[in-house]
Image (cartoon, grey):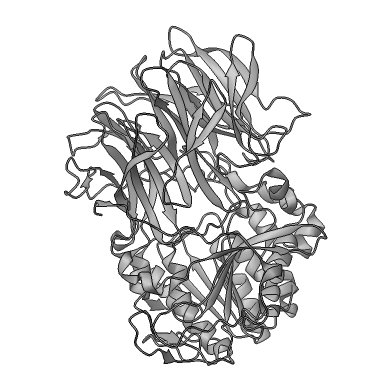
Amino acid sequence: MVATTAPWVVSRASTLLISIFAPCRSKLSIARLSTSRRVVMASSDATGGEKITAPYGSWKSPITADVVSGAEKRLGGIAVAGDGRLVWIETRPDEGGRAVLVKEPVKPEDKPEDIIPPAFAARTLAQEYGGGAFAVSKDMFIFSNYKDQRLYKQSIEDLVPVPLTPDYNGPVVCYADGVFDHHFNRYITIMEDRRQSSLNPTTSIVAIESKDGNIQEPKVLVGGNDFYAFPRIDNTGKRMAWIEWSHPNMPWDRAELWVGYFSENGDLCERIRVAGGDLELVESPTEPKWSPKGELFFVTDRKSGYWNIYKWVEDKDEIVPVYTLDAEFTRPLWVFGISSYDFIENNGKGHHIVASYRQNGRSYIGILDNGESSFSALEIPFSDIYNIVVGCGCLYIEVASASHPLSIAKVTLDESHSKAKEISIVWCSSPEITKYKSYFSVPEIIEFPTEVHGENAYAFFYPPANHSYQASLHEKPPLLVKSHGGPTGETRGVLDLNIQYWTSRGWAFVDVNYGGSTGYGRKYRERLLGQWGIVDVNDCCSCAEILAAKGKVDGKRLCITGRSAGGYTTLACLAFRDTFKAGASLYGVADLLSMKAETHKFESHYMDNLVGDEDAFLQRSPINFVDKFTCPVILFQGLEDKIVLPDQSRKIYKALKDKGLPVVLVEFEGEQHGFRKAENIKFTIEQQMMFFARVVGQFQVADPITPIKIDNHD
């Protein structure tokens, strides 16, 4: 860590059988929370010993910042190789956040195999958020290399990647969401070309020759629109489906589904717009997939406002629903390569669809019978499901729950496809986590009234939990409110050691799905249109105030934190309301007009719909209302962030410092939009804890943390 004269600058899996994991608690209306119930633990711990009575926030916990940073492994997509084994990307904080391609071992008792050399990392910067950085075929895979953003081909058994795309003397051309086109012996992918403009790159669907030693310029197949995703080719190699959209829309606002027909030389000779062309019908189609029979399925939210699965009847050019439910069968396209459903063989009688959906704050998975439009739920011990791919006689699913961390589960079904015969864990983000189970706080799903009459919002509330400690009968815990990013996103009640770090030390924690969040349909998502900085702020404040009024938390020790868009909501809460006593913004937005002018292409018009006219941009920018800030703020920022530029944090830091408020700015060299290095993840959570303890807490932190200097305080 290197300190400058102003802000601080920091330079810098095993296989097991599933037992039983507790899901989230049942839905609980906050209006029914008893005011007489105190958050006080029993007088003896789980082992029968006496508990230590100590103030909330001062409890000692084995869930240290080192444990949290070590468990920050993430997934970057999953796919099944030709030999039936799973391939995935995992990011490793202890390797500086490197994204590594990994393959499932032959024997369950063996360790997964790294399949790219240490000098390579499988990560694309397309649309900055990336995703879809690799694809696998029978005996090879192609991946985007982080350092130069070129595509490389590598055989499954070889450790020598071979470049497929030209060297442009820097990472100025990015590729994502690719698929193999075996009919023409090529690779079809999204290409983002930044050679002419880094702020306004050209996006297209291109074909790349996959022959060894034949590096050529990619051939454009589809271009002219602002954005593309999901190029998908049918089994015959004659048709390709894709999604496209244009400014000022985001893909979840309005998008179009197209199908093109290949000519004999591999060009698209005919194109049909399947969905999204009716101006009177608002919809956002996504995730097109061709079934083994050559039928086109996709997900869209037409008419009902919920993302459901539909099918295109080609000979009639009609769209028919496969199964209708007030639930979300996909999630917003922030990253490429989403796979919310797949096709599974039905005992030689055709194919069914295995799909997951979100409803009332949790995930479900089941088998869709396309012919009968029926959905049979599968009982699995997870409350959250992300990507799904079908393997040889099994399913691979990205899963989590309130007591189980992010993992890849292998699910073997019975012959009727109605039950899970066996479930095993192929990969776990934190395989040693079970030893901390007695310290876990299990979330309650709460529903609370908003400032708009008749409208409710949702959150996950985590009470303090530590089997070795209790507080005095007369004390209530401090509360940390988290505002999720996006803002078009959703927080989920899954096991997150970032949260357990706080609750095991005696903090209460609430993760808010404010109006505008996904998972509740388009109507709920669109509450934020024209109201960003109002609805999200009101909902976060209301949630905290109601919890305090019901006696769940200490109303005098309410704090708030958020990342990216959640950082903006944090700063807006501190500028425009007096609910919170301190806040932490991680790469948050302080100046909306600057953000609009400086951010990357994908989000360059995002705020137009969220905010409104120029006056609204001015009136909702915290930087313009520094005089209204009354409490301490700590800021964290990556210096290579291309989404929220470092100047955002620097401007609000200087303004608050000049006003005389306690403030800290921590800047990390080598970090982008989200921190990936273990040492920086550790430093961030420890300094947030220490900051809140010093300015709000009324307690001493048990951990040996060296506090950094707080301007206007120390």
Q: Is residue 60 left or right of residue 443?
A: left
Residue 695 in the image: x percent, y percent? 57, 88
Which residue is more in the foreground, 249 or 700?
A: 700
Q: Quadrant of residue 646?
A: bottom right
Q: Quadrant of residue 595?
A: bottom right
Task: State the count of labels.
Answer: 0
Residue 243 in the image: x percent, y percent? 57, 29
Residue 177 shows up from this direction: yes
Q: Is residue 70 above or below residue 374?
A: below
Residue 159 in the image: x percent, y percent? 18, 39
Q: Residue at x 61, y 16 (%)?
A: 272
Q: Is residue 696 above or below residue 449?
A: below
Q: Residue at x 41, y 51 (%)?
A: 381
Q: The N terminus is located in which quarter? A: bottom left
Residue 340 shows up from this direction: no
Q: Is residue 349 above or below residue 524?
A: above
Which residue is more in the foreground, 150 or 334?
A: 334
Q: Is residue 283 left or right of residue 706?
A: right
Q: Is residue 630 left or right of residue 368?
A: right
Q: Is residue 313 above or below residue 565?
A: above
Which residue is more in the foreground, 96 or 647?
A: 96
Q: Residue at x 80, y 52 (%)?
A: 613
Q: Residue at x 57, y 26 (%)?
A: 373
